[in-house]
Image: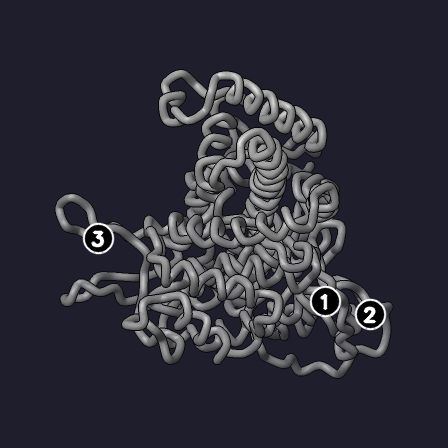
């Protein structure tokens, strides 16, 4: 029992289970409490807090709180996995024996065996309609796979080895309704194929440079070329092949840091302070857990690609889960962003041979990127028992694999949707528009004076940067042109700009 304002409140559902078993896991995003008064919902920080009148009270009853969680709350698999591991198995088994056809009992039974890997001493279900593991009104779901043992339709996004969840929030529903993929195709259809081909080349290079910039790096021409080649392979990349993933890492990092397998050492993300101490931002999974987590990652990515999961949801879940596992010493961030393009292209969300330079949109608002990563990393610190060794390396002393295996991916999906919308409406829109204007202006300028391409291109860029006119300070760079010729050229550039603006609208 605790207090909110001047009211006493009792926990319900996931929050009760977390408190009852002293679970070392982050709190669920949805917190439920019994209070005196009417039913209401409040958003406090990043949490949704649900208040229920006293008629909903569950008391100190494990089954009653499991039932409440399954009935009223979005499921938090991290809390449920820890609770099932902490409670006697007979509690769930007895519930199923008492209610063999009950939908909540069978869902609890399915989730218990799914999350713990332990079979309960129960015969297969023989009665009751199939019930979905996740309520599709509360969650984004995958295509169902029936579990005849429980008479439960498994519509989870992943597999027992890795299974994030995504809540169906009003914000996410609105983002999906934008249909940004259709908007991108409409932009493309308005432009000449030759212009599109040039834009594609630019966008691949822009994505490469932006992906390195997120990590504070400027790639050499060789590294740029290799990463562009990797991005072009995204539609045919096999995310279920360990060799392909290791090969991708080798392709995009300095050869001295090329991996031959998943990492075998404890890793963390941090920075060195001015007094030469390490400030830890994120503790990666233990090396002994990486192999099983990556097996889960490959299976879950395949499940989402084959299971009809909305493309941006699948891209965000796969990409952020990868970077949280951090299976390599180097290249994790770039592969994390490569995975976005792999999923969007494989699902047909991004048009053929085109890339949405999501990294460019991240660079424009990198603070929010860092903040959304912290939404995952900060709650983990309280759940991880770690320390520095005498060699100034980190050691993790408790079982932390479930923290990375089962997490709420909703913030990362919402974040990626915003970045995809931004990059379509900014990078794709502006680049295609610029090239169309530039080509028309070039044709008009060359019709007035047959200038060398480099001189004409410089003149047009200077005019475009100044509203269609050549500034007086730049005029001296073109002494070979008369004032009349420049005036005619300015008119041509301004006409191209006006026509381009009309086409964009």
- The first of marks 2 and 3 along the sequence is 2
- Mark 3 residue crowding within 10 angstroms, few (<14) / some (14–19) / many (20+): few
- Residue 444 figure quarter: top right
Q: Foreground residue, 450 or 190?
A: 450
Which mark sits nearer the N-terminus, 1 or 3?
A: 3
- Contact check, label 1 and label 2, Cβ < 8 Å: no
Q: Is residue 10 at least partly visible in the picture?
A: no
Element at badge 3?
strand
Q: Position of residue 49 (x, y in %)?
A: 59, 38
Tell me if 403 is positioned left or right of 158 in this view. Answer: left
Look at the picture and state if 203 lies above or below 34. Answer: below
Question: From the image, which quarter does the C terminus lie in?
Answer: top right
274 vs 373, left or right, is left
Residue at label 1? 307
Residue 268, position as x, y percentages in the image: 32, 60
Q: Residue at x 26, y 51 (%)?
A: 271
Mark 1 crowdedness (10 Å alpha carbons): few <14, some 14-19, many ≥20: many
Residue 277 shows in the view: yes
Real-space CA distance between mark 2 and mark 3, rounded to the nearest whole angstrom: 55 Å
Location of mark 3 (residue): 278
Residue 88 position (above or below residue 74) = below
Q: CA distance from mark 1 to mark 2?
A: 27 Å
For label 2, the residue is 101
Q: Are marks 2 and 3 in contact (CB under 8 Å)?
A: no
Q: What residue do we see at 54% from left, 70% from top? A: 297
Graded by Cα atoms within 10 Å as few (under 14), some (14 to 19) or many (20 or more), the crowding at tag 2 reads: some
Which of the two discs, 1 and 2, labels the residue nearer the N terminus? 2
Pick the residue in front: 343 or 210: 210
Between the residue at mark 1 and the residue at mark 3, the CA separation in whole angstroms equals 42 Å
Q: Secondary structure at mark 1?
A: loop
Name the residue: 67% across, 56% down: 311
């Amino acid at each position: 029992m605790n207090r909110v304002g001047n009211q006493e409140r009792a926990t319900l559902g996931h929050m009760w289970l977390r408190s009852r078993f002293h679970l070392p896991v982050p709190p669920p995003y949805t917190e439920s409490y019994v209070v005196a008064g009417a039913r209401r919902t409040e958003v406090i920080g990043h949490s949704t807090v649900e208040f229920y009148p006293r008629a909903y009270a569950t008391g100190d009853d494990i089954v009653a709180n499991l039932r409440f969680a399954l009935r009223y709350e979005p499921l938090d698999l991290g809390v449920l996995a820890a609770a099932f591991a902490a409670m006697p198995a007979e509690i769930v088994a007895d519930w199923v024996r008492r209610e063999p056809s009950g939908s909540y009992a069978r869902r609890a039974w399915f989730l218990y065996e799914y999350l713990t890997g332990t079979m309960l001493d129960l015969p297969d279900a023989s009665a009751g309609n199939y019930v979905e593991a996740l309520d599709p009104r509360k969650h984004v779901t995958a295509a169902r796979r029936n579990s005849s043992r429980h008479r439960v339709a498994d519509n989870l996004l992943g597999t027992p080895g890795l299974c994030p969840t995504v809540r169906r929030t009003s914000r996410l529903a609105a983002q999906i309704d934008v249909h940004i993929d259709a908007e991108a195709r409409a932009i493309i259809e308005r432009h000449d194929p030759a212009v599109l081909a040039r834009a594609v080349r630019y966008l691949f290079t822009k994505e490469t440079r932006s992906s390195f910039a997120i990590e504070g790096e400027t790639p050499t021409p060789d590294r740029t070329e290799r990463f562009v080649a990797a991005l072009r392979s995204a539609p045919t990349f096999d995310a279920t092949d360990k060799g392909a993933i290791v090969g991708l890492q080798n392709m995009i990092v300095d050869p001295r840091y090329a991996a031959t397998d998943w990492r075998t050492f404890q890793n963390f993300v941090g920075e060195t302070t001015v007094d030469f101490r390490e400030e830890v931002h994120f503790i990666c999974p233990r090396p002994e857990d990486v192999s099983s987590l990556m097996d889960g990652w490959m299976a879950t990515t395949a499940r989402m690609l084959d299971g009809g999961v909305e493309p941006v949801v699948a891209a965000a879940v796969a990409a952020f889960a990868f970077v949280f596992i951090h299976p390599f010493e180097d290249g994790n961030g770039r592969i994390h962003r490569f995975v976005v393009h792999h999923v969007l292209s494989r699902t047909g969300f991004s048009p053929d041979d085109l890339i949405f330079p999501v990294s460019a949109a991240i660079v424009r608002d990198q603070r929010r990127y860092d903040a959304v990563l912290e939404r995952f990393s900060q709650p983990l610190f309280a759940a991880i028992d770690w320390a520095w060794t005498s060699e100034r390396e980190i050691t993790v002393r408790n079982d932390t694999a479930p923290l990375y295996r089962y997490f709420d991916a909703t913030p990362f999906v919402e974040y990626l949707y915003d970045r995809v919308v931004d990059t379509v409406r900014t990078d794709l829109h502006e680049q295609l528009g610029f090239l169309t204007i530039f080509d028309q202006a070039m044709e008009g300028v060359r019709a007035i004076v047959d200038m060398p391409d480099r001189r004409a291109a410089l003149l047009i860029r200077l005019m475009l940067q100044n509203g269609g006119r050549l500034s007086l300070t730049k005029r001296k760079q073109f002494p070979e042109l008369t004032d009349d010729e420049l005036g005619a050229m300015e008119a041509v550039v301004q006409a191209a700009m006006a026509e381009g603006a009309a086409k964009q609208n």
